[in-house]
Amino acid sequence: MHTLITAGKGGTGKTQMLYHLLQRHLLTDLPGRLLVVDADPHQSLTTLLDAPPAETLGHLKKRHQHAIKRGVGLQLDMSRQEFADWLTRQALIHLDERADLLVMGRSDTRGCQCSVNNLLGQALDTLADEYDWVIVDNEAGIEHIGRHGWPVDILLLISGAQPMELAVARRIMQQAEDTGREIRHPWTVINRLQQQTVPVGALPAPFLGALPFSVQMAVSDQPDKAWFKALDALWKTLRQQTPLLREGSRVPAMVSRP
């Protein structure tokens, strides 16, 4: 299974970019079965996809935590692990004939998404053999990049051209290095570029491309033609520069770090 995830400072437009990339390219161009994961507690990607879950995975696991921890009240004579895996599949939302959506939900631990991030790693271990691609919209911020053990094939670091946003993107890459997270193809995408020059020397990863500021997107979720043209060019460059996208190959199931 291959993985593509987004990361960046809050407010950089990463979820909107991923949503339109899904609609225009990922859902149609990527081979095999796809799992889209909304790992942001705000569930903005889920809202844009218009696919609200009856219950998030986090809520399901909380509601059945007694059964999972103690083995009491399990259904269908399942083991605790089998029951946890069954709950993961209950949380899946069917998007189309090839793609499903998994909404992680919010943690009940104040100020921390640790438990939900751990659930994500467990869920991907459960589903690893069933999907060719996993596409994750990460929560904004730095620490989440180090909370999963599975490798990242493509990381899209979304940032504006402002020094503060670029500084956060650099800290995300540093966090990945410090925690031993394997990132095979990291890329920087500069979003909402106006008259600034892209500071190539200050980028945390190779420069994939830039998306222009869209007045239309600033007041709605629908960009203008120039923005879409830039997004299509960005996808074309990503395919040209990333061998696994050119080959459409499949890799063995992911193995999480202990």
Image (cartoon, rainbow, N blue to C red):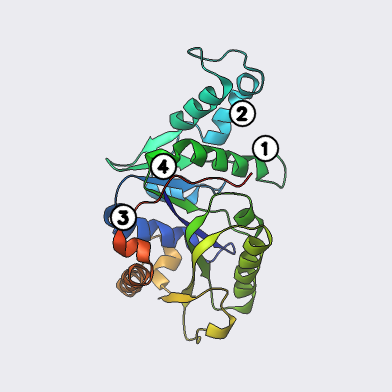
Q: Which residue is mark 2?
A: 62
Residue 246, percent across and down? 30, 64
Q: Which residue is mark 1?
A: 108
Looking at the image, is 6 positioned above or below residue 190? above
Q: Amino acid at mark 1?
A: Asp
The residue located at (47%, 26%) in the rendering is: 86
Residue 29, percent across and down? 28, 57
Mark 2 vs mark 1, CA separation in Å: 9 Å
Q: Within 10 angstroms of label 3, few (less than 14), some, or many (20 or more) residues?
A: some
Q: Which residue is mark 4?
A: 101
Residue 75: mark: none
The residue located at (63%, 69%) in the rendering is: 168
Residue 30: mark: 3
Mark 3 vs mark 4, CA separation in Å: 15 Å
Question: For the residues carrying marks 3 and 1, which lies nearer the camera in this image?
Answer: 3
Q: Amino acid at mark 3?
A: Leu
The reply to whether the C-beta atoms of the residues labelled 2 and 4 are less than 8 Å apart is no
Mark 3 vs mark 1, CA separation in Å: 35 Å
